[in-house]
Image (cartoon, rainbow, N blue to C red):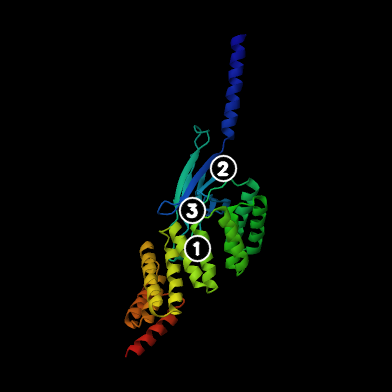
Amino acid sequence: MINRRRWFSALALALVLAAAASAQRSMIRGKVRTPGGSPVNNAIVELRIGGSGMISQTVTRNDGDFAFTSLEPAEYEVAVAMAGYEPAAQAVRFENSEGMKFMQVVNVEIILRPKADAALALPATLFAQDVPKAARAAYEKAITKLRDGKSAEAVELLHTAIAEFSDYFDAHFVLGQEMFRTGRDNEALEELERARQINDRQDAIYHLFGLIMFKQKKYALAQRAFREAETLKPNNPASHFHRGMALIELAIRESGEPRDSDFNEAEHELDRAWELSNQHMNEVRLQRARIHERRGNKEAAVRELEAYLKAEPEAKNAAAIKEAIAKMRNTKK
């Protein structure tokens, strides 16, 4: 009798475990990185099935991580998109064998490669926080709205995220970035200052502040902001490039030794940006041409402009550049 009870108990346990196993769902866990190994946060990650439309979407966290859970065995595609980077996708397949009733976890790592002009994009932020779920949910929805071009809805959601968690660094920063994009500079500065109070070691804060100062033609403040961004992240070509531009604007308005010094430093910054971008930041050539022209070396300026057109034959400003080249050549004759 005892053996029979044990047998029934073992059978019941087996049935429970079998039911639990059949109810298990699989999981895709991943990380998005740059070619240099840095995590990419705030990237949009879509999950697609069988080559059809999207079935789920998420946003990478501060460490570049993402996950999709409760998945049926099937073939999926994970697609990642981020401003300034080439889109990337990776196929993921779960086995669907009768002998495999347990949950499967597939780990993927996706590399996002910068676009040719990505060096000019705003640097990404990297600041891990323990964010309440409600705030995180509002923030992720805001990122999706921004991607869809729905700025007003995104701004409202970012304010909701901040209301849920007042020290939400990413929400303050992204809100500041959107305020700047839509021409609301004073509000952008307020959000940047709040983000800086939460974490003053992010180069992206100073870079965006520099862009605002440059837009307002406060070039001395702009170059100082970009220099601070360089200090925090020396290998970011965008900060070197924009500091070079700010120094050129200062030099144009100066004379004598200050003018020469700022042109020399601007040239150094542009060379550094060119080097760090693996010689892909063709806008550097345009700024070098400005320096050469101001120094009276029109031949060198023409060479830089021609090199730019060779690298960017479909550039929107190609006609204006060709006209500038023609004028400088006529002046030399």
Residue 148 visible in image? no
Tally the marks. Answer: 3
Query: SS of the residue at dot 1?
Result: helix
Tell me which amino acid carries mark 1. Answer: His
| Badge nearest the viewer, 3 or 2 | 3
Q: Name the residue that disc number 2 marks.
A: 69
Query: SS of the residue at dot 2?
Result: strand
Around disc 1, counting alpha carbons within 10 Å, would you say few (fewer than 14), some (14 to 19), or many (20 or more)?
Answer: many
Q: Are marks 3 and 1 in contact (CB under 8 Å)?
A: no
Quadrant of residue 117 in the image?
Answer: bottom left
In the rendered image, the vertical position of residue 15 relative to residue 196, given as above or below: above
Q: Could you say where residue 318 lies in the image, as x and y percent from the top left?
A: 43, 78
The mark found on residue 207 in the picture is: 1
Q: Could you say where residue 309 lies in the image, as x and y percent from the top left?
A: 38, 76
Q: Could you say where residue 108 lies in the image, as x and y percent from the top left?
A: 46, 46
Front residue of this view, candidates 251 and 280 = 251
Where the N terminus falls, by quadrant?
Answer: top right
Mark 3 and mark 2 lie on one chain; the one further toward the N terminus is 3
| Mark 2–mark 1 distance (CA, rounded to whole Å) | 37 Å
| Badge nearest the viewer, 3 or 1 | 1
Q: Name the residue that disc number 3 marks.
A: 40
- Residue shown at 39%/74% (left/top)? 263
Where the C terminus falls, by quadrant?
Answer: bottom left
Front residue of this view, candidates 319 and 171 = 171
| Mark 3–mark 1 distance (CA, rounded to whole Å) | 18 Å
Quadrant of residue 237 in the image?
Answer: bottom left
Query: SS of the residue at dot 3?
Result: loop
In the rendered view, does 198 fall on the left or right side of 271? Answer: right
Mark 2 and mark 1 lie on one chain; the one further toward the N terminus is 2
